[in-house]
Image (spheres, grey):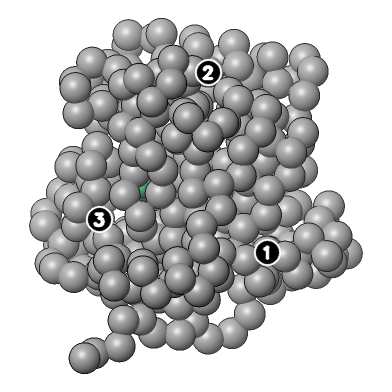
């Protein structure tokens, strides 16, 4: 049987403790697990402002029907809103905050730009899940991100508990690249952002990786920060509770790792999914 994966070469963390806010111990944990959860990263007035902005963006009907606003399979509720660091000054300010950019510098070993930003709203009862996947698999195949020099920062904006579909990660899975079965159809994102079926790892690979290291689902009050490597396998269940599980995500890509022409898909994905450094965005 062909091997289920290819081992990743080289270090995951390419920077050091003296380049930003993370301690050596935190960097070591990220290297080993492929993610790091910091409860209470934000609080007080700053968090309250972000939660107000979260609601204002969600309530803004001007975004309805735009390609960067993804609805749930039911067609009603907003599932994800992309390019939020373009749509909102509040989220733009947070995306450029040294507390995040500094963490990205330490992990990536150099300066970065925002490859993608989004809010996943996961509304109460209606918010469906996200199948297990590696973001890098998609960003490599469809956006042509050359190498694994990107990190996601997920800011918990509503309490994440066991019933409203918290993000689940497989520790250590970032150390292997699981090739995905099947061709990448044109405009795959028009389906995958609602329900990802192409570009997902095999159940056998998932079984073996979960048998090795289990599954972790960092939970906690709004304000937490989850940093996870671009290649760490993650997913989430549907929201079975009345409480939304809304998180904001900024993806930091190292400037020398900018996307070029697609490896697998026929054309690059739209700018709301893969931003060109320094480019403008016309919502
Ligand atoms: O295709 C993408 O870029 C998006 N899809 C998923 C499931 N996670 C990363 C990103 O938001
Ligand atoms: Fe993802």
- Determine the residue positioned at 11% across, 57% down: 185
Q: Of 110 and 235, which appears nearest the observer?
A: 235
Q: Earlier in the sequence, mark 1 or mark 2?
A: 1
Q: Nearer the viewer, residue 275 or 201?
A: 201
Report if the beta carbon of the residue with label 1 is closer than 8 angstroms to ligand 2.
Answer: no
Q: Which residue is mark 1?
A: 30
**Mark found first going from the N terminus, 3 or 1:** 1
Q: Residue at x 60, y 25 (%)?
A: 159
Q: Residue at x 70, y 21 (%)?
A: 47
Query: Which class describes the residues within 10 Å of circle 2: few (<14), some (14-19), or many (20+)?
Result: many
Residue that numbered label 2 is attached to: 54
Tag on residue 209? none
Q: Quadrant of residue 204?
A: bottom left
Q: How much space separates mark 3 and mark 1, taking CA atoms?
A: 30 Å
* Residue 263 appears left or right of 109: left
Q: Which residue is mark 3?
A: 268
Q: Residue furthest bottom?
A: 1
Q: Determine whether the residue tagged by mark 1 lies in a helix, strand or loop.
A: helix
């Amino acid at each position: 049987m062909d091997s289920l994966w290819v081992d990743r070469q080289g270090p995951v963390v390419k920077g050091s403790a003296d380049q930003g806010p993370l301690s050596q111990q935190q960097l070591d944990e990220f290297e080993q697990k492929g993610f790091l959860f910091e409860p209470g990263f934000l609080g007080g007035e700053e968090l309250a402002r972000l939660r107000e902005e979260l609601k204002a963006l969600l309530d803004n009907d001007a975004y309805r029907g735009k390609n960067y606003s993804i609805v749930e399979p039911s067609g009603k509720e907003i599932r994800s809103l992309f390019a939020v660091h373009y749509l909102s000054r509040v989220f733009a300010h947070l995306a450029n905050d040294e507390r995040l950019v500094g963490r990205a510098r330490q992990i990536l070993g150099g300066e970065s730009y925002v490859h993608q930003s989004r809010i996943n709203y996961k509304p109460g009862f209606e918010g469906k899940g996200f199948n297990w996947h590696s973001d890098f698999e998609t960003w490599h195949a469809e956006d042509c991100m050359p190498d694994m020099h990107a990190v996601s920062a997920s800011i918990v904006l509503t309490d994440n508990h066991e019933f409203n579909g918290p993000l689940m990660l497989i520790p250590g899975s970032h150390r292997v690249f699981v090739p995905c079965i099947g061709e990448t159809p044109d405009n795959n994102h028009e389906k995958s952002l609602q329900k990802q079926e192409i570009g997902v790892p095999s159940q056998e690979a998932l079984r073996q990786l979960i048998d090795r290291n289990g599954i972790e689902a960092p939970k906690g009050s709004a304000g937490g920060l989850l940093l996870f490597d671009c290649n760490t396998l993650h997913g989430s269940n549907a929201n079975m509770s009345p409480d939304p599980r809304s998180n904001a995500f900024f993806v930091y890509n190292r400037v020398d790792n900018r996307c070029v022409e697609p490896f697998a898909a026929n054309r690059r994905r739209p700018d709301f999914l893969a931003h060109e450094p320094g480019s403008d965005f016309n919502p």
